[in-house]
Image (spheres, rainbow, N blue to C red):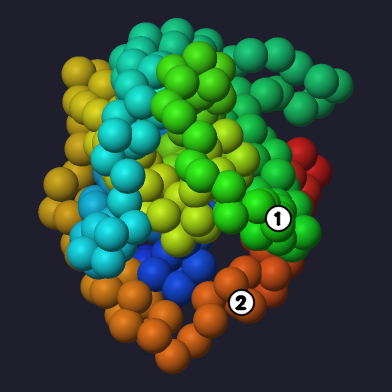
Amino acid sequence: MEIVLGYIAALVIGITLGLIGGGGSIVTVPVLVYLFHVEPVLATAYSLFIVGIASIVGAYPKNKHGNVDFRLAAVFGGPSIIAIFLTRKFLVPLIPSSLFTVGSLEITKPIFMLLLFAILMLIAAFAMITNRQNEKYDFSKQERPYRFTDYVGQSIGVGLLAGMVGAGGGFLIIPVLVSKRNIPMKKAIGTSLVIIAANSLIGFTGDLFHTTINWPFLLFVTTLAVGGIILGNKLSTYIDGQKLKKGFGWFVLLMGLSILCKELFF
C-alpha cells in the first residue's frame, strides 16, 4: 500500500511543480524515505536526479514563451554548480555515521540529514505561506546589469544547501533573481528551473563515484514526476498555481514538523 501511495505522490510532486514552480520539489525526499523506504542519504541523491529531470521538462515551455534568461542562469549557476558537485562528492561522504549523542538520542548521519531537510522544509513553508516570492518590485525600471559579485555568495549557498539535502532551492533562487536583477516573476521562475536542472544533475554525478543506484526504480519514479509536471503545466492554464501556494506551504510546514517530531521523539 505504501508503494502505491509513493507512486501517486511522485505524480503529485510533478503536478505541484507544474502548478506552483519553486518549492514543489521539497516533498521529494520525505516521499522517498517514508513511502519507498529509501535510506535518507541515498534519497537526497535520488531527489537531485528527479528534480533535475523534472526541471528540464518544466523549463522547456517557459523557454518557448521567452521566460528563460540563459546568460543570467550561467552567471548565477556557475558557482552553485561547483559548490553542489564538491558537496556531493567530498562533503557528504565525510559526514561520520554517528555525529553525537543527546541523552539517549544518538544523532546518526541519516537522522542528521532528515533533521536538516526538515528545517529546510520549514523555511520553504514560511516563504510560500508569506508569499515572499511575490513581493512588489518596481518592474517599470530597466533590468539591472549582470554583476557576478551580486550573485556569488547566494549562488554558493544554494549549491551547498542543495548538495546537502537534495532540494532544488527554487524558493531561495527566485527572490534573489527578482531583487538583484529586477526581472519579471515569470522569467525568474523559468530561469530558476534551468539553474536547478544544472545544479541537480551535476550534483547527482558527484554521487555516482560512491553510490549504488537502483536505476529501474529511479527512472520509474522520475517518469511519474515528469508526467505530473507535464499535466501540471497544462492545468496551470486553467488554475492559478500561485493561489495554491499558500495552502501547499501549510502542508509542507506540517510535514516538516512531523519529520522533526518523528526523528527526535519517536
Q: Quick check: can you spot residue 200?
A: no
Mark 2 lies on a secondary structure that is helix
- Of the pair 111 and 103, the residue shown nearer to us: 111
Residue at which label 2 appears: 244
- Residue at the spot x=37%, y=77% of the render? 232
Q: Position of residue 5 (x, y in %)?
A: 43, 74
Q: Which residue is mark 1?
A: 135
Q: Which is closer to the viewer, label 1 or label 2?
A: 1
The amino acid type found where label 2 is placed reads: Leu
Residue found at x 80% / y 43%:
265
Image position, residue 20 (x, y; %) = 50, 68
Residue shown at the point (61%, 40%) measured from the top left: 179
Q: Quadrant of residue 78?
A: top left
Q: Would you place residue 175 above or below residue 107 in this image?
A: below
Left or right: residue 12 compared with residue 122: left
Can you see residue 195?
A: yes
Q: Position of residue 249 (x, y in %)?
A: 68, 63
Q: CA distance from mark 1 to mark 2?
A: 17 Å
- Name above or below for residue 104 compared with residue 100: below
